[in-house]
C-alpha cells in the first residue's frame, strides 16, 4: 500500500514527502535519542563512505532521509549498492544531493525518492548507502552520529574507502519501505497473532517500525493504524 504523508523535515525549498513505512533508523538530528550529531567532509576529498544497512521485512524501498550541514550549492553523489560493506556491486540507485540551506550549521534534511528504482528486498537483505564527493565542492558535510557510542546506535558498519570507518560512527539516515504486506511484521507473508505481538514489542520499545501513522512519534494513533492494517490482512 502506498502512502503519502506530511514530511517531518527541517528543510526549506523541498516539496518532497517521504512515502512508505519507516524500517531502518540511524539517528542524526539533535533530539534523536542518543544521537551526537557530527559531520564529515564528503565533497572536499572525493572520499567514498559506505554505510551498510539491512531491510527488516519484504518490501520495496521508497524513501531515504539524510541530513547535511555545509554551504548552499555543495553536493555529493548518493548511491545504493547491493551487498555488504564494502560493496562494489552495481548501483541500484544514484542521485546527486545538493544542499540548499545557506546557514552552514543549520541541518537540512534531504528526502530522496527511491520509488522509481523499484528496489525490492527480502527480510535481511543487505545494501550500502554510499556517499561520495567529487573533490570540487569543499566544505560539504553529511551528518553522522557520534563517534564514541559503544555499542554504535546503528549496528551495521560504516566503511571509508573500503576500510572500516571510525569507531561507532555511522551515517545518519532513515529508510522507508512499502512492505509487501503492511501488518506482516514477522515477514513470512501472512498475518497472525505473532505479528500482533511483534507490533506490541516494537511499540513498547518505541522502535521506529511501530510508527504506523508515520509522523516521527509513536503513540496510540500508531496502535490504531496497526489494528486497521492487521484487520485488512495481507
Ligand atoms: Ca507474519
Ligand atoms: Ca506515529
Image (spheres, grey):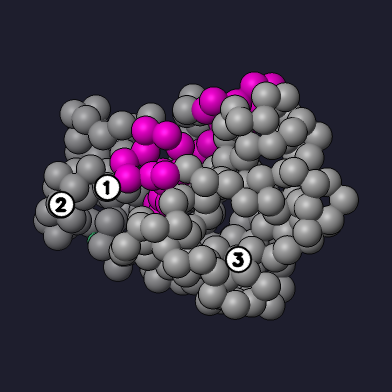
The answer to which of 108 and 78 lies nearer the viewer is 108
The answer to which of 203 and 228 lies nearer the viewer is 203
Q: Position of residue 67 (x, y in %)?
A: 57, 40
User: Quadrant of residue 13 in the image?
Assistant: top right
Provide the secondary structure element on which disc 2 rests: helix
In the rendered view, would you say 39 is above or below 130? above
The Cα–Cα distance between marks 2 and 1, rounded to whole angstroms, is 8 Å
Relative placement, left or right, of 102 versus 187 is: right
Relative placement, left or right, of 160 versus 97 is: left
The residue that appears at 32% across and 45% down in the rendered structure is: 34
Q: Position of residue 141 (x, y in %)?
A: 66, 45
Badge 2 vs badge 1, beta-carbon distance below 8 Å:
yes
Going from N to C along the chain, the mark reached first, 2 or 3, is 3
Provide the secondary structure element on which disc 3 rests: strand
Mark 2 sits on what residue?
Answer: 201
Number of dots carrying numbers: 3
Disc 1 crowd rating (10 Å Cα; few below 14, some 14-19, many 20+) is some
Badge 1 vs badge 3, beta-carbon distance below 8 Å:
no
In the rendered view, would you say 77 is above or below 17? below
Magenta part of the protein: which range?
9-36
Provide the secondary structure element on which disc 1 rests: loop
In the rendered view, would you say 198 is above or below 232? below
Mark 1 sits on what residue?
Answer: 207
Q: Position of residue 23 (x, y in %)?
A: 40, 52
State which mark lies toward you, 2 or 3: 3
Amino acid at each position: 500500500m502506498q502512502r503519502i504523508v506530511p514530511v517531518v523535515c527541517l528543510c526549506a525549498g523541498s516539496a518532497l514527502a517521504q512515502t512508505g513505512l519507516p524500517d531502518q533508523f540511524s539517528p542524526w538530528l539533535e533530539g534523536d535519542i542518543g544521537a551526537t550529531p557530527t559531520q564529515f567532509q564528503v565533497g572536499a576529498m572525493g572520499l567514498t563512505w559506505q554505510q551498510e544497512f539491512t531491510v527488516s521485512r519484504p518490501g520495496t524501498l521508497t524513501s531515504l532521509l539524510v541530513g547535511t550541514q555545509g554551504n548552499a550549492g555543495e553536493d555529493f553523489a548518493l548511491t545504493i549498492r547491493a551487498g555488504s560493506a564494502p560493496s562494489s556491486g552495481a548501483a541500484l540507485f544514484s542521485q546527486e544531493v545538493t544542499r540548499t540551506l545557506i546557514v552552514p550549521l543549520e541541518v537540512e534534511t534531504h528526502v530522496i525518492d527511491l520509488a522509481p528504482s523499484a528496489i525490492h528486498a527480502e527480510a535481511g537483505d543487505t545494501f550500502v548507502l554510499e556517499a561520495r564527493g567529487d573533490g570540487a565542492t569543499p566544505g560539504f558535510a553529511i551528518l553522522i552520529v557520534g563517534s564514541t557510542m559503544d555499542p554504535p546506535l546503528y549496528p551495521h558498519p560504516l566503511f571509508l574507502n573500503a576500510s572500516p570507518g571510525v569507531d561507532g560512527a555511522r551515517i545518519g539516515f532513515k529508510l522507508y519501505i512499502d512492505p509487501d504486506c503492511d501488518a506482516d511484521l514477522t515477514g513470512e507473508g501472512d498475518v497472525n497473532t505473532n505479528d500482533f505481538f511483534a507490533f506490541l514489542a516494537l511499540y513498547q520499545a518505541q522502535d521506529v517500525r511501530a510508527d504506523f501513522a508515520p509522523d516521527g512519534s509513536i503513540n496510540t494513533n500508531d496502535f490504531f493504524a496497526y489494528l486497521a492494517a492487521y484487520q485488512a490482512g495481507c
